[in-house]
Image (cartoon, helix red, strand yellow):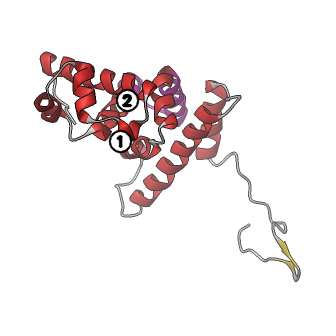
């Protein structure tokens, strides 16, 4: 994936990305070839491989650009709060509905999750009061998976929640103020209540 700032290279990268997204509106992702993308962008295969490994790499680039936009806006704030992060995440996704819609339609959620992992790691490093430990990877995997599936549900819903509602929901979940575990009998069997040690 290209991460330089050469203007000519950036134009080529953008043309290839636009070409793929345009093709995804017309046909199935699995049937789109590198040749199709190059023809649509009017660029050579050599140019394509100068910047990308394959078409998945283009999608990851597009998602990365969205998250980079989010990080840039948050970097203007100091200090950054969890509420700022959840609000900006939902705003960024909402502002990139076309891209997210194509990702959902073509079942590319695994690419969304891959890029989300790197974003979560960035914020975890900034907000964590202790050095990163070996369990952080598990926590990142949990968060990225959960947020990805929430995003997918949002874009698939017939009546999607408002951006502000989703931001507030995510904030409440992450701060432990949504789900409540009660000391009651959550599951019953033919032998009575199944015991739990969770209070």
User: What is the quadrant of the C terminus in the image?
Assistant: bottom right
Segment colored magenta: 68-94
42 to the left or right of 22: left
In this view, the residue in front, 169 or 34, is 34
Where in the figure is residue 12, as x and y percent of width and height? Answer: 19, 21
Where in the figure is residue 121, as x and y percent of width and height? Answer: 37, 46
Q: Is residue 48 above or below residue 170?
A: above
- The residue singled out by tag 1 in the image is 122
Please name the residue shown 16% across and 28% down the image. Answer: 4
Whether residue 75 is visible = no
Q: Residues within 10 Å of mark 2 (few under 14, many from 20)?
A: some
In terms of sequence position, does the residue under pointer 1 or pointer 2 come before the other?
A: 2
- Image quadrant in which you'd find residue 31: top left
User: What predominant SS class does the magenta segment belong to?
Assistant: helix
Q: Residues within 10 Å of mark 1 (few under 14, many from 20)?
A: few
- The residue singled out by tag 2 in the image is 71
């Amino acid at each position: 994936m290209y991460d330089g700032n050469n203007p000519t290279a950036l134009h080529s990268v953008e043309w290839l990305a636009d070409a793929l997204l345009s093709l995804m509106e017309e046909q199935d992702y699995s049937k789109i070839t590198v040749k199709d993308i190059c023809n649509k962008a009017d660029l050579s295969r050599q140019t394509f491989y100068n910047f990308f490994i394959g078409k998945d790499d283009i999608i990851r680039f597009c998602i990365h650009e969205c998250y980079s936009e989010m990080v840039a806006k948050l970097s203007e704030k100091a200090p950054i709060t969890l509420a700022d992060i959840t609000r900006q995440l939902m705003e960024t996704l909402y502002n990139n509905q076309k891209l997210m819609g194509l990702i959902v339609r073509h079942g590319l959620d695994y690419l969304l999750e891959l890029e989300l992992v790197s974003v979560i790691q960035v914020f975890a490093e900034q907000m964590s009061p202790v050095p990163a430990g070996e369990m952080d990877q598990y926590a990142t995997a949990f968060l990225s998976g959960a947020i990805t599936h929430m995003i997918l549900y949002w874009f698939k819903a017939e009546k999607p929640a408002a951006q502000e509602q989703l931001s507030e929901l995510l904030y409440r979940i992450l701060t432990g103020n949504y789900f409540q575990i009660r000391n009651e009998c959550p599951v019953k069997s033919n032998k009575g209540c199944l015991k739990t040690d969770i209070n």
